[in-house]
Amino acid sequence: MKMPGNLLAPLKRFAAEASGEIGLHLSNERANLVQFENSNNGPRIRAAASLPYPCTREQLLADPRRLKALLSQARSEHDFKGRRVVSCLRAAELQIFPISYTAAEGQQEAVAILGELRERLKGALDASVIDYLPIRTEDGDNARREALVAVASRESVLRHLDLLENAGLQASAIDIGPAALARLVSFVNRTDKREQHPNALVINFGRAKSYLSVVWGRRLILDREIEFGECVLVERVVRLLGMGEDLAVRLLQECGFRSDPAHGGNDPEMAQTLKEVLRPELATLTAEVNKTLIYTASRSRGRSIDQIYLLGSIGRYPGIDRLILEMLAVPVEVLNPFRAFGSRLGEAELARLRPIAGIALACGLALRGFDHHA
């Protein structure tokens, strides 16, 4: 992010450099870092790390020396090169919403969008950092256009930049999380045999809320927050099965929903019990996903989603992909961010990153600056 200015200001390409910038995602529980380097076959993973925090996230961010020590450890022990990073704000610090606008003849697109935003945001506009992602429409109306707009407070952006600087890092950009995931999905989808760029829904599960992002080909066209998260499932298991929260979390992460031993289920009876106990809560997720699918079809002349990717906290539960497939009848898989790339990392290093979907956002951030067609 460049200050002042837009949230997704273009960066210099890194084709002439051996390594790109470090993608840094400070998640709720871990610091995730990924760095790519150029190869004849496109981006290749140079280094990756996922380190648990020694304290709560809030305590760590309030102690610059402790954060600097953790990130320095990650960079030195895992062969990262340089100090330049691409990071992102937390979802709670960012608003993403669609707008429709009309650009007069000769009027710059950004000016037309700012005109619409002044009406919506009123006085808050001048204290915000803003950017937009154009959305191609298929309704034949060339005058009326659409865009996804990202808005963050200037205070949040400056605070995050200071955080990185105090940690001994140089911020090349503060990216938008859903846009970084769309970038990653576009790279991963190059290996899909059905078509070059299938349309995907990314479900990023959080502790209290989750986020649904629609990636249409290579472009992010929708991002919405839903009132559904891991806490809801954990609380229901605690209440109905009469166990402590720590045990409930461990049960979900280790047993999950794999009731078929042929697919890795180690406790079929418990997996079936968890399915039945959590079915009402999962029905809420299904309803929200169906709303998104219907909306997407209404804006794309009936075209639908080809693939659903899962990541985040609930994405760690064994068998969650098969369970959601049963509920939605759309191909579902837990997002493996390394599927599309070569890597320097050995099996032992990859094993330390598991569950590997947890590092997906850092991968998307690190891919900024690499050409899709490299």
Image (tube, rainbow, N blue to C red):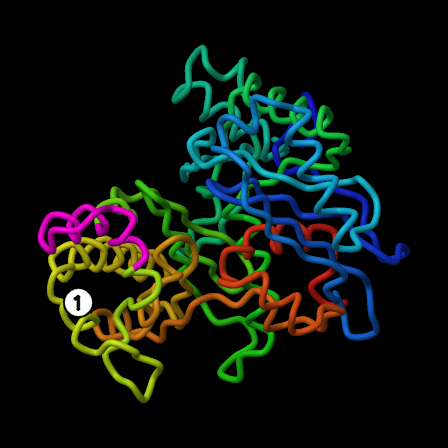
Label 1 secondary element: helix
Residue hosting label 1: 275
Three-letter code, disc 1: Lys
Q: Quadrant location of the N terminus?
A: top right
Closer-to-camera residue (69/224): 69
Q: Quadrant of the C terminus?
A: bottom right
Q: Residue at x 48, y 66 (%)?
A: 335
In the image: residue 207, left or right of residue 52: left
Mark 1 Cα-neighbour bin, 10 Å: few <14, some 14–19, many ≥20: some
Residue at 49% across, 23% down: 115
- Of all residues, the one furthest to the top in this rendering is 123
Whole-percent x and y of residue 207?
34, 43
Snapshot quadrant of residue 334: bottom left
The x, y position of residue 72, in whole percent, is 74, 39
Q: Position of residue 168 (x, y in %)?
A: 77, 30
Expressed as whole percent of the image width and height from the top left, the position of residue 231 reads 26, 44
Q: Nearer the viewer, residue 356 or 132?
A: 356
Q: Is residue 240 magenta?
A: yes
Which residue occupies 78% across, 40% down?
Answer: 84
**Farthest right residue?**
16
Q: Is residue 164 left or right of residue 215?
A: right
> In terms of depth relative to the viewer, which is nearer, 259 or 225?
259
Residue extent of the magenta highlight: 233-250
- Extreme-left residue of the structure: 240
Q: Residue furthest bottom?
A: 262
Magenta stretch: includes residue 101: no
Quadrant of the image occupied by residue 271: bottom left
Q: Measuring 49% from the left and 83% from the top, which residue is drawn there?
A: 194
Above or below residue 348? Residue 55 is above
In-front residue for pair 177/355? 355
Q: Is residue 310 left or right of residue 262?
A: right
